[in-house]
Image (cartoon, grey):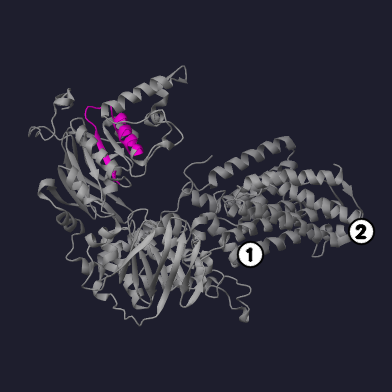
Amino acid sequence: MADGTMLNRSRNRIAELRAERTLQDWIIDLGPFVLLFLLVLGFSIASPNFFTVSNLVDNVLRNSTILLLVSLAGTFPILQQSIDLSIESMVGITGVVAAILISDYQLGVLALPIAVLAGTFFGGLNGIVFAKLKIPSFLVTLGSLSILSGSALLMTGGTSIPYRNPTVRWVSTGELVFSIPNIVIWGLLFYLLMTFIAFKTPFGRYCYALGENEEVADLSGVQVDRYKIGAFVVSGLLCGVAGALLAARTSSAAPGMGSGLLLQSIAAIVMGGTALTGGVGGPHRTLLGVLVIGVLANGMNLIGIQSFVQEIVLGFVVIVAVAMSMDRRKIDIVK
Amino acid sequence: MVMTMSSDLSTVDHGEEPGGSEAPRLQVSNLSKSFRNVDALSEVSLSIETGEVVGLVGENGAGKSTLLKLLTGIHQPDSGQIALDGKPIRIDGPRDAAHQGIAIVKQEQDVVPNLTGYENLFLDRIPDFTRFGIVRSARMRSRAEEVIEQLGIELDLSAPVSSYSFTERQMLEVSKAFSESIDTDHPIILLDEPTAGLDEGGRELLFDRINELRDRASFVFVSHELDEVLEISDRIYVLKDGVLVDEVGAADADESMLQRSMVGRETADEYYRTSRQRSLSSGADVALRAEGLSIGDRLDDISFSVREGEIFGVVGVEGCGKSALGRALCGVDPPHGGVVDVHGEEIRPESLSRMVESGLGYVPKDRKAEGLLLYQPLTMNISLPSIGTERTSHDLGGVGSLFPLIDSGKEHEMADASVEQLDIRTPGLDTLVYQLSGGNQQKVVLAKWLQRESDVLVMDNVTRGIDVAAKEEVYRVCRELAEDGVSMVFIGDELPEVIGMSNRIGVMKKGSLVDIVDAPTGDKPTEEELIEMMI
């Protein structure tokens, strides 16, 4: 039955399919690696202080950890084609909760997991309102961005809450392993955990399915609401971790301490390869984007580019990254 | 040549044969188009004379819509040419087609309901009706009134289109097609299933208009309703598998003749493999029983049962509730009342996930929008309903069901087994499913449920939009599944298919199950018998 011509035809067809990887596919896959390499190379040449262990570990990695946690948080909703815009104030309020519990209630290290729980709870509320009331996630979380930041301001009276507690500080700044700051270890642990969740658990798998086509997931018997809420729970949890570690690191917390993280995290997520159109990429790739942003910020500091200019550069980076990664096959009309 | 076209259109009478030397109004020669590995259209040549109504028939996937898309410039042909009045043309898109004189009335009505009739009529030309950037509504409206008056169509153009009846919208579409091509002498209006959804009155109105307008336009009438095609057309072209297989004068043709040349195979029995249909003794176990399923006025107290290995067809006209029945059975749209009994377990179908637990699987009507994660790998599509079950999870020494972690090895084995079982033609297990042909995609949808070990499948138009060869494959697969004891609720729009495949057929009408007809091998009901019950 399978005569020569048929075999040939199917071979040609297979070759044809292989050739169908578009330029965009290649850019998304390899782009962040190339970009990271070029940035490291460029900054190494431009500044002698850049390619040193102390700069790379103490500055780049340590400063990138909070961004990594927040970007991992944002990855799951974006993977599902939703978005969590509340992460900045989520970091702010959980940090404030931790600081108040330590300074006013003397809870010490116990305050940190409580702050994480608070973040998880707020994330859950985001998710429930989004999934059950069927309100677009960007609107729900834009609302909660305002609610949470207002609440944090109310709790603190708008000022920063300092405290003294060496143990809490050690959680973030200590060096348990070699001379790597603990905060970096935390970042790494959560990175591995999230990558595991994305690939090995039904939740992770459904994130991809929902991002690709929620209707299909629904008609395959997936309880979609549960997993939509789940993405925001995970997002809240990780923001809680970020808030708690940030409060621990600085021995204080201020309502606005998360500001600037939202745009940076979206840039990192998208540059890593998780498109705003959902269904592709994942937390494992987000690390790449975070490193690009981290290296970019550090390098620009070293060669003396002022922070206002850095902000302008970041804005361009976000727009270009989104433009290159959007899967336009999936959406006909963008509004 | 264009100059020889009569400038006074009213003098071109319907039926008057144009001179032999004159080129036809529209000439299509050796037009070919293929998509991926499928030849959608190959070497099709046809012509349409001034004032003619030409019917175009063929099964789903025969190439009708591809031809229309080539004629309106949505796709460009791989080879061949399209000529107007003997002059070859290139068509750059629907707008360009309209300007050159080929306009289409589409199956899905392209109207913006919140705008008025006249705004819809000139939607793409609103900038032409402005002065200093301000829209001159009165002028647009009076112009629109002129257009429909000329066409003899009555519509309240100042009302928003949302207040129009289905028929009125269709008339607006016809007017729009005319107005878009109004600058050309003698437009060719392509009517793609124009009577779908129209009631008797609307259909008559449409046919009246077509007959009236014959002296001002040519029509291409595409429809599944062969009697309508015969009634309105002068000549009929028959397409099958992308090839023009027949051209007949309407006066010399009848329905069964068209049907034969559309299907073009020895006997329907062979096509549907009725010889392999199981004869089920009344003693066979009941796999699925529905009792008193109701949803408002969409579904009214529906009860029936399906035995193991039985294919239970469901037919009815558009809007009779047959799709709603499928969705209710599976808990996709939970019924307000009634129960479903799967293998003796009585359940209220409250959610699909609950029904899946009991062994049901749902093959939705729209493969691409509802059945497949198009841009995800084959493997992931097949395993989707099984994720979280032990079929895709690590054992972890027995606690795997508590903490289901995806075992990609098992997942790949699962996909591999399906590719083997259903003969899915794919370059690899990681191929994104949008790259597969329609028939193979549909097999992936079936595989999803088979791998979930669903043995009662509710299938809504399982062969919709796939080519004939792929259909045969799907029929073969269904027969094999039935032999393995899988039960199927086979909901279909195409009567011959349902009749050919089913053991018994439930006929629906206005939300009720009006009759259940036996359809054993060798004693199948005819289409006419079913239609009588349907309407």
Does the CB distance between marks 1 and 2 fall below 8 Å? no
Q: Which residue is mark 2?
A: A106
User: Magenta stretch?
Assistant: B168-195
Picture mark count: 2
- Is residue B157 found left or right of A318 in the rendered image? left
Query: Looking at the figure, which quarter contains the N terminus of chain B?
Result: top left
Chain identity of mark 2: A
Residue A39 visible in the displayed image: no
Q: Nearer the viewer, residue A124 or B171?
A: B171
Q: Quadrant of residue B293?
A: bottom left
Q: Nearer the viewer, residue A314 or B417?
A: B417
Say which of marks 1 and 2 sits in front. Answer: 2
- Is residue B415 found left or right of B190 in the rendered image? right
Residue type for callout 2 = Gln
- In the rendering, at what x and y percent does residue B495 appear? 27, 60
Instruction: Give the residue displayed 26% in from the left and 29% down from the top.
Output: B152
Residue A169, relative to residue B285: is it above or below?
above
Q: Nearer the viewer, residue A291 or B438?
A: B438
Residue A194 visible in the displayed image: yes
Q: Secondary structure at mark 1?
A: helix
Instruction: Give the residue displayed 29% in from the left and 26% down from the top.
Output: B149
Task: Give the farthest residue toward the left.
Answer: B20
Q: Secondary structure at mark 2?
A: loop
Instruction: Give the residue displayed 14% in from the left and 52% down from the top.
Output: B254
Dot 1 or dot 2, earlier in sequence: 2
Q: Point out which mark residue A197 bears.
A: 1
Label 1 environment density (alpha carbons within 10 Å; few <14, some 14–19, many ≥20): some
The alpha-carbon separation of the residues under discs 1 and 2 comes to: 34 Å
- Is residue A270 found left or right of B135 in the rendered image? right
